[in-house]
Image (tube, rainbow, N blue to C red):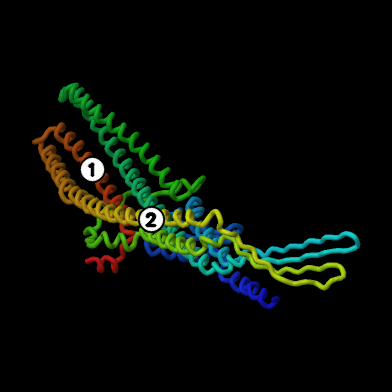
Amino acid sequence: MRAALLLPCAALIVLGGCATTSPQESAAAVASLVQERTGAAPRLTGPGDEAAAAAVAQEVGALLKEPVSMDAAVRIALLNHPGLQATYWEVGLAQADLAQATRLRNPSFGFSRLSGHGEAEIERSIGFDLAGLLTMPLRQRMEARRADAARLTVAAAIERHVLETRKAWVEAVAAQQSLAYARQVNSAADAASELMERMVKAGNASQLDLAREQVFYAEAAAGVMRATRLLDAARERLTRQLGLWGEQTGYTLPERLPDLPPAPHELARIEQTALARRLDVQAARTAAQQLAADLGLTRTTRFVNVLELGYHNKNETGAERANGYEVGLELPLFDWGGARVARAEALYMQAVHRVADTAITARSEARESYLGYRAGYDLARHYRDEIIPLRKKIADETLLRYNGMLASPFELLADAREQAQAVSGYIEALKEFWLADATLEGALGGRQNEQVREHQK
C-alpha cells in the first residue's frame, strides 16, 4: 500500500519541474517575432535589475543625442515606454500559469486525537488530488496553448504600438516642416507688405492693393500660429509614444520628411499575405484551437469534479495500529456537467465566428491600405513631378518678365502666393504617403522584406 502511494508522489515531483516560472524564454520568442516584423526588438526589464535599466537608459540617451529618425523612434518606444513594458509582462503571467499547470495541489494532512476513560485514539491521514494528476497532461497542453496565444497577443500589441509610433513620427516631422515653410511664407509676406506700402506712398499702388497684401501677411502670421499649435500637439503625441519625460522631451527631429521612393511597392496577393502574417489573425486561430481543447477537457471531466486518494492509519490504546486508504468522490446527483459543456461549446462557436470576422477584416484592411498607399504615392509624385516644376517655371518666367519691366509687381506677388500653396500641398501629400506606408505595413503584418515581395510577384 505504501509503495502504491509513493507513485503519485514521485509523479508529482517529476512533473513539478517540467516548466519554469521565468518569463525570459517566452519574452525572447515575442522579441524575435516583433523584430522580424518591425526591424526592432523589445527588451523585458525585470524588477531590481539595475544593470538592465542602466543599459536601457544609456541606449535611449544615445539615440536622443541625434535627430530622432523613424527607426530610432521605434527603438526608443520599444525600450522605454512603460505601458509597453506592462503589456510585455503578459508573457510572464502566461508562463506562470503554464508552470502552475505542471504542479499538483499540495497534499492535505489530517490528524485527530480522542481520549477518555484512560484510552486514546489517534488518526492520521494524507491525501492527494488524484483527479488533478490524471488530467495534468491535458491541463499542460491547454496552458501551453494559452501561453502561445499570449505571446501572439503581446506581439500584436507591440506591433500596434510600433505602427502608432511611426505615424506619430511622420505627423511630428511634417508639422515641423510645415512650420518652417509657414515662417518663410510669413517673412516673404512681410516683405511684400512693406514693398506695397512704399508703392502706395509713391503713388504706384492703391489702398486696395495695400489691403490685399496686408491681409495676406496677416493670414500668413495666422498660418504660423496654427502650424505652431499643430507641431506642439504632434510632438506631444510622439513623446507619449516614446515614453519620454522631463529633459528627454527636448529631443530634436529631422528637418523634413524622407523623399518619395523612386517607385512604389508592387504587391500581389496582399489578402493572402495579411492572413498569413497578421498576428491578430494568428491569435484568433490559436484562441479557437485553445477553446476546442478546453471543450475536450470539459467533456472528459464533466462527471468528476473532485477525486482524492489518501493514506489513512489509526491508533487505539491497547490495540495495534490499523492502516488503510480513503477515496473522496463528488457524486454527480444534481450537476451532471451539462451546463459546463454547453458553455464551452458556446465559447468555441463564438471564437470560430471571431476568427472569420478577423479574417474578413484583415482582407479588407489589406485591400484598403494598399489602394491608399498607391493613391498617396501617385498624388505625392504628381505634386513633385508636375505641379511643383510648373510652379517653379511660372515663378522664373514671371521674375524674368518683372526684371524686363514686362510684368507688374502685383503679378509677382500673386504668383508667390500660389507657389506657397503648391509647396504646402506637396508637404501634405508627402505626409499622407508616409502615413499610408505605415498603415500598409500594419495591415500586411509588418515590414515586407525583399524575399516576401519577390514571393508575391
Work out which quarter of the rendered image holds the N terminus and state it.
bottom right
Earlier-in-chain disc, 1 versus 2: 2
Task: Give the percent coordinates (x, y) of residue 82.
Answer: 51, 51
- 266 horizontally vs 157: left or right: left
Identify the residue shown where x is 13% and y is 42%: 394
Tag 1 near tag 2, CB within 8 Å = no
Quarter of the image holding residue 198? Answer: top left
Which residue does the image show at 81% across and 61% down from the upper left? Answer: 113
Q: Which residue is mark 2?
A: 349
Q: Amino acid at mark 1?
A: Gly
Viewer-closest of 262 and 304: 304
- Residue at 38 percent across and 50 percent down: it is 164
Mark nearer the viewer, 1 or 2: 2
**Residue at far front of view:** 333
**Residue 246 image point, x, y percent:** 51, 45
- Give the residue number, with chain letter if any, for mark 1: 425
Residue 428 seen from this side = yes
Q: Secondary structure at mark 1?
A: helix
Element type where label 2 sits in the image? helix
> Between residues 21 and 160, which one lies in front from this camera angle?
21
Q: Position of residue 229 (x, y in %)?
A: 37, 36
**Residue lying at 38% horizontally and 62% vertically, measured from the top left:** 39
- Direction right: furthest residue: 118
- Image quarter in which the C terminus is found: bottom left
Q: Nearer the viewer, residue 62 or 142?
A: 142
For residue 26, side relative to residue 167 (left or right): right
Q: Give percent across and percent down for residue 92.
A: 53, 60
Task: Look at label 2 and name its amino acid.
Answer: Met
